[in-house]
Amino acid sequence: QMQMVVSGGGLVQAGGSLRLSCAYSERSFATYFMGWFRQSPGKEREFVASISVRGDTYYQDSLVGRFTISRDSAKNMVYLYMNSLKPDDTAVYYCTAGRTSRPADNWGQGTQVTVSS
C-alpha cells in the first residue's frame, strides 16, 4: 500500500507555474509534518518546504515568495504551488513525512519537474 502518492509534475516553460499534489495515508501521517524535497541531477536532495498539522509553514529561504505549501487534512492532501519557475527548479520532487519541520523520515515516490528556458 502506497503511503504517499504524488502527482502533478511535468514540463513547463520558465516563468510558468505548476502544482504538485501528494495524497498521504491518514493512518500513518495524520499528525506528521508533511513536506517536499527535491533533487537535481548531480546534486544532493534539498529541502523545499514543509507544513505542520496546524498549518505552520517552513521554506527553503531561496524559495520564499515563489513556492507555497498547503495542506488539506480533511482530504489527506498536501500541495506545492510553484510559481515563476526557473530552469534551476528542474528536479525530481519528493513528498515526505516526518516528526520535525524538515520531515525526511518517510519518502513517497518522486515526480519530475522540468523547466525549459
Image: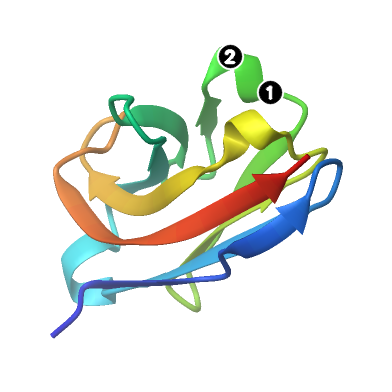
Pointer 1: residues within 10 angstroms few (<14), some, or many (20+)? Answer: few
The answer to whether one can see residue 101 in this image is no
Numbered circle sitting on residue 64: 1
Residue 93 as seen in the image, left or right of residue 20? left
Residue drawn at (53%, 35%) of the image = 56
Q: Residue 51 location, x and y as percent?
A: 47, 41
The quadrant of the picture occupied by the C terminus is: top right
* Secondary element at image label 1: loop
Residue 1 as seen in the image, left or right of residue 90? left
* Secondary element at image label 2: helix
Pointer 2: residues within 10 angstroms few (<14), some, or many (20+)? Answer: few
- Give the Cα separation between the discs numbered 1 and 2: 6 Å
| Amino acid found under the numbered disc labelled 2 | Asp
The quadrant of the picture occupied by the N terminus is: bottom left
Q: Quadrant of residue 10?
A: bottom right
Q: Nearer the viewer, residue 58 or 17?
A: 17
Q: Is residue 53 above or below residue 42?
A: below
Q: Nearer the viewer, residue 84 or 12?
A: 12
Q: Residue 61 location, x and y as percent?
A: 58, 14
State yes or no: discs 1 and 2 in contact (Cβ < 8 Å). yes
Check disc 2 and report the residue beneath it. 61
| Amino acid found under the numbered disc labelled 1 | Val
Numbered circle sitting on residue 81: none
Q: Residue 55 location, x and y as percent?
A: 54, 44
Q: Is residue 65 above or below residue 35?
A: above
Residue drawn at (41%, 35%) of the image = 40
Q: Nearer the viewer, residue 99 or 116?
A: 116
Residue drawn at (41%, 39%) of the image = 38
Residue furthest top in the image = 61
